[in-house]
Amino acid sequence: MPWLQGRLAEVLPVPYAHLVFTLPHSLNGLYAMHPRWVIDTLFTCAALTLAEFAANPKWMGCAHGTPAFSLVLHTWSQDLQRHIHVHAVMACGVLDKEGQWATPTRKPNFLFPVQALSRVFRGKFMAALVGAHNDGGTDSRSDAGTSRLTVSERPFVEIRSRSA
């Protein structure tokens, strides 16, 4: 337990959200042909989407906030089928320009609307895919199905290892 206690001491004493950025199964062929590109692009698009929303005063009450999140890649589902997605664990808030913690404008444990996140993420991934295709970096036979890119959000256990 000392290791776990050490990790909990590193966690911000704020609510967290768990978000999942998922690629449709129709992109499995693209992943098979260009795994590094797909993984790099998935991480980049997820991180840029979260940073863009975190910097928006509409959601965080301050402009240009700095988010705190971790991303973890999963390439398989629980039944060992290929299922490419990135889990994000994000603190519900941002650091403002003065280094003060700013909480979300709607509720302390609500980050962003899932459908809006999905649209922005999908747009970023599509733009990257079109750019790579135009530059000859991907094979058009593996590009089908990109109109179904989605993000899902589920509640995450609130972590309070020390008093707020």
Image (tube, grey):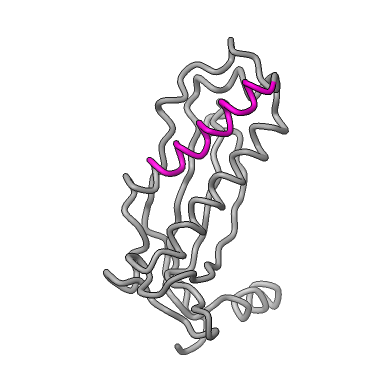
Q: Quadrant of the N terminus?
A: bottom right
Task: Judge left or right: residue 108 versus residue 163.
Answer: left
Question: From the viewer's perspective, is residue 14 above or below residue 149?
Answer: below
Q: Who's the residue at 45% across and 52% down the image? A: 19
Residue 35 picture location, percent across and down = 70, 29
The residue closer to the viewer here, 161 or 154, is 154
Q: Quadrant of the C terminus?
A: bottom left
The residue closer to the viewer here, 137 or 82, is 137
Does the magenta segment cover residue 133?
yes
The dominant secondary structure in magenta is: helix
Question: From the viewer's perspective, is residue 127 above or below residue 64?
Answer: above
Task: Judge left or right: residue 26 versus residue 61.
Answer: right
Does the magenta segment cover residue 101?
no
Question: From the viewer's perspective, is residue 103 above or below residue 156?
Answer: below
The residue closer to the viewer here, 113 or 124, is 124
Q: Who's the residue at 48% across and 57% down the image? A: 52
Residue 123 picture location, percent across and down = 45, 37
Furthest-bottom residue in this view: 163
Quarter of image, res 42: top right
Residues in magenta? 119-135
Q: Who's the residue at 53% across and 85% down the image? A: 98
Q: Who's the residue at 49% across and 80% down the image? A: 13
Residue 119 in view, yes or no: yes
